[in-house]
Image (spheres, rainbow, N blue to C red):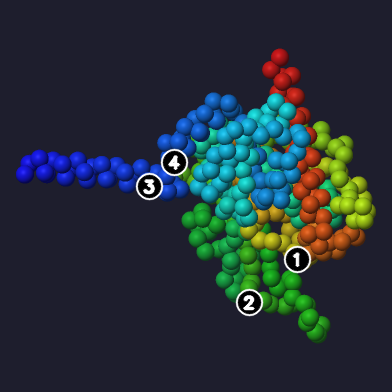
Amino acid sequence: MESIYRYTSVYYVAVFALILTSVQYTNGALLSKETRKLINRANRNGPYLGLVIPNLFEMNPLLNSSDYTPVDPVIDISGRRFRFGTIGDQPVISVMTGLGMINAGITTQLLLSLFEVEGVIHYGIAGNANPSLNIGDVAIPQYWAHTALWNWQRYGQGTDNELALEANGDYTREIGYLKFANYTSNVTGSDSSYDNLLNNIWYQPEEVFPVDGTPEQREHAFWVPVDPFYYEVAKTLKDLTLERCVNSTTCLSTTPKVYTVQRGTSASIYLDNAAYRSFIYNKFNVSPVDMESAAVALISLQQRVPYIAIRALSDLAGGGSADSNEADTFISLAADNSIIALLAFVKQLSAIKKISSI
């Protein structure tokens, strides 16, 4: 009987171990032994520049570029595929995030937690809020902000009223607000003081928890700076030749250029509204508007990893451009221009690093 119990105990231990092994392979929160081996092998060839890319149409032209050389392995983790390669002699990891701030943040955190990454470059297309820029131009901001974290103020209260939880330090009125009543339309009469039940939204900074800070002690960030050295490198791209034509019959009226600009903004909102575009430009002096860059910036800030974003303008958000303003008209051209700028940036960065190491 004792031998039967011993056999049964050993059997259940073996089954339990098998279940744990299976969980490692199926649960995205855990890594299989083989995946860990691949990560360790890849990291021996680092550090890498991490290329964080929103969508396949922005990634595939890079993978097909003659300036990009793929290198084994390809590692799939938690629904993300990490591809390894080189641009010139610079090792890179590329990964697609998917649409929006949450996807971008999760993917960037996975990248920086698992791999030896010396810097992050985020690139892709964006809408344009700056009337002095044109479709096809590449905008490289010095600062990024997430502009969809709000305190939505109660109706009947105004700028002199303290926000809910403001006294606790959770919210602030320092950044500014949008008053919905200022955008009332189709009204009659001479009275210019209109009201709106939606009242005001107040822009808020993100809570951040830097890797070198104290756990659970928050800091706040609204304008997140890109790496100052990367930004100086970006300035050398101003004379870069970019694409002007989608095909033989569809061309832009101006020749696209690369611009280093002051600010860009992100939110998980597709912005196609001229009134809001004008508001955020006049309020914050932003140029590109997109759905991911600020998330990548915030994760890079918290992990203390150098970061920059390169965004090519595919449309004037909300319309009004002299060119066709449908985003799908120039989306492929904008994607190509973002990759042209990315490749030039990586090559220039690599060349400067070589010179400085001599």
Q: Is residue 258 left or right of residue 155?
A: right
Q: Tell which tag, 4 or 2, sits nearer the viewer.
A: 4
**For marks 3 and 4 on the same chain, the one whose residue lies earlier in the sequence:** 3
For badge 4, the amino acid type reads: Leu
Distance from disc 3 to disc 4, alpha carbons, whole Å, reads 9 Å
Q: CA distance from mark 4 to mark 2?
A: 50 Å
Q: Kindly state the secondary structure of the residue where label 1 is placed.
A: loop
Q: Which residue is mark 2?
A: 197
The quadrant of the picture occupied by the C terminus is top right
- Disc 2 vs disc 3: which is toward the camera? 3
The image position of residue 31, as x and y in percent, is 44, 41
Residue at mark 4 = 31
Residue mark closest to the camera, 4 vs 1: 4
At which x and y percent is residue 346? Answer: 73, 32
Say few, some or many: other residues with alpha carbon within 10 Å of mark 4 (under 14 / 14 to 19 / 20 or more): some
Instruction: Give the residue type at disc 3.
Output: Val
Residue depicted at x 51% and y 33%: 39
| Circle nearer the N terminus (1, 2) | 2
User: Marks 1/3: CA distance?
Assistant: 46 Å
Which of the marked residues, 1 or 3, is nearer the chain's N terminus? 3
Residue at 80% across, 57% down:
315
Give the image quarter of residue 324.
bottom right
Q: Residue 23, labelled with which disc?
A: 3
Residue placed furthest toward the bottom? 189
Residue, disc 1: 273
Which kind of residue does numbered mark 2 sit on?
Leu
Q: Tell me which amino acid carries mark 1.
A: Asn
